[in-house]
Amino acid sequence: MLRVYGEEIASRLLLGTALYPSPAIMVEAVRASRAQIVTVSLRREAGGGGGAGQDFWALIRELGVRVLPNTAGCHSVKEAVTTAQMAREVFGTPWIKLEVINDAETLQPDVFGLVEAAGILTREGFKVFPYCTEDLGVADRLLTAGCEVLMPWGAPIGSARGLNNVYGLRSLRAHFPDVPLVVDAGLGVPSHAAAAMELGYDAVLLNTAVAKAGDPAAMAGAFALAVEAGRTAFEADPIEARDMAAPSTPVLGKAFLE
Amino acid sequence: MKVSVIGAGVVGLACASELQARGAKVTIYEQGESVGDSACSWWAGGMLAPWCERESAEEPVERLGAEALDWWDGRVGGVERNGSLVLALGRDAGELRRFARRTSEYEEIDGTRVGAIEPDLAGRFGAGLYFAGEGHLNPRRALADLAKGLAARGAELCFGSAMEPDNAPGDAVLDCRGLAARDVLPGLRGVKGEMLVIRSADVTLSRPVRLLHPRIPLYIVPRGDGVFMVGATMIESDDRTRISARSMLELLGAAYALHPAFGEAEILETGVDVRPAFADNLPRLVRHGNGRVLHVNGMYRHGFLLAPAVARMAAEAVLDATATPEFFQC
């Protein structure tokens, strides 16, 4: 079972709640995904600093799953910290998916701001889930800042490109065998999620791939199956790839070759 | 039969029109001081685009929306039937393929054809989708003309009157107050929309143009005389105070991407309001209490598109207590 910040979570799929054709379809997709954690954004929905997104947030709370508010859309430490504080008020949780964006085009994280904000929020009692890259040094700094989970990207947010740097993700997994690692962002199809799980990642987080699919609920179900398949495969200890054929049925000594 | 209609937005006026056409004596109560004064339909794009909307809307929006062009032409005229154009910048070609897969009744066109349809966009786009059967209207003129027609045929319009449904006189009451009815309609939420009205003498368009973008899909609707409506954001928020800087950047960025000459456009107006919507973003007809009050609400971003069909259903439900039209709830 997935363990983060002392909590046991039954599902290894985390789902975002943005970009669906309607809230009703979002609810169907969350159910079909069997996700136990959903992310929700606040930055733009809050309007002029108030709680103008209350109706939508009430729908999220009614899902009956854990809410992981995020700081999507924040480009500075100050914005991210303020948004996290508001999220704690709105959802009554110390959990925060921390995004500090550097580049508007690729939505790459500002890793320096990320580490700084993670330290500030941890000292304020937050449980920080940082959206980061697969860089080992950044990972180390985030852990030192107090993060107990890391969420490296597979590819840029919403890009549907899958795992851009399998080597880097494998390396991160190997360097931090005991830290919960979640591939966050860039997944497009269920095979991407299965691949991440086969690498030994503890979970995946996605949004666009489900929300923008023609049938979001069906796609959510497909991702749930893929995550389960990938995790089971990882635990079953896959064989190594090899260059030479290794027949599963010996041919030597067969009486007839048809 | 005497019917009170509360709310002079697009839904209230369309319902009043359908009821009047069926012989009812209609009185309209509007809390604002004039037509559109407090209605989110005042800020609408006025696109009558049932096939484009299918990209993100459910099936009834396309089926019922297809009635809208003839209805508006019949009631107030002024429907421009020049189709609509869907475009994407080169690197967003995938968005165009996705849009095409989700919709129908379009023609796939190349850059030459884009230029033939909208000469000012010649050479700017390599591909697009042309929905020839769609149209658009000027929503403010349509609301005003609809109200004028209602009054001319004997309807009474009471402005500055915040009537409560239970207190309204008549044999039946249609509550078309939009988000103001959220106290009696659980699950009704607001979806913030922001828009701009700009004027440019440098660009001429004859039909709405949708510019697809993975983050910021927007549209531009020509209003004639060099005036364009640029819309509209979709934010899960009921804040209706002001447009945000980011939203204005996105709206202007889209206009600029469509044609750089829009960079020199005058900004005539900024608009912000909140669309009333239920969780499935589809309308509802809800009968309350002793059956005298019918709430008609939840038009989301499809006010002008769905008002004709929803008004027809509402009028049927008012005149026949046994009617159970689509979207009807007891």
Image: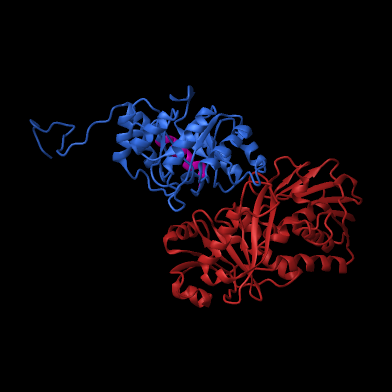
Is there any visible trace of residue A72 in the rendered image?
yes
Magenta region, main secondary structure? helix
Which residue sits furthest right? B169
- Between B254 and B283, the residue placed more toward the observer is B254
Q: Colour of chain A?
A: blue
What range of the chain is rendered magenta? A215-226
Percent from the top left, x then y, of residue B312? 75, 58
Magenta-span inclusion, residue A224: yes
Q: At x 71% / y 70%, what residue is drawn?
A: B73
Q: Quadrant of residue A235?
A: top left
- Between B257 and A111, the residue placed more toward the observer is A111
Q: Left or right: A107 with respect to B184?
A: left
Is there any visible trace of residue B66 in the rendered image?
no
> From the image, which quarter does the C terminus of chain B lie in?
top right
Percent from the top left, x then y, of residue B19? 82, 59
- Between B268 and A110, the residue placed more toward the observer is A110
In the figure, A117 relative to B317: above or below? above
Q: Colour of chain B?
A: red
Q: Left or right: A27 with respect to B137?
A: left
> From the image, which quarter does the N terminus of chain B lie in?
bottom right
In the figure, A97 relative to A7: above or below? below
The image's colouring method is by chain
Q: Quadrant of residue B221?
A: bottom right
In the figure, A100 relative to B51: above or below? above
Percent from the top left, x then y, of residue B47? 64, 64
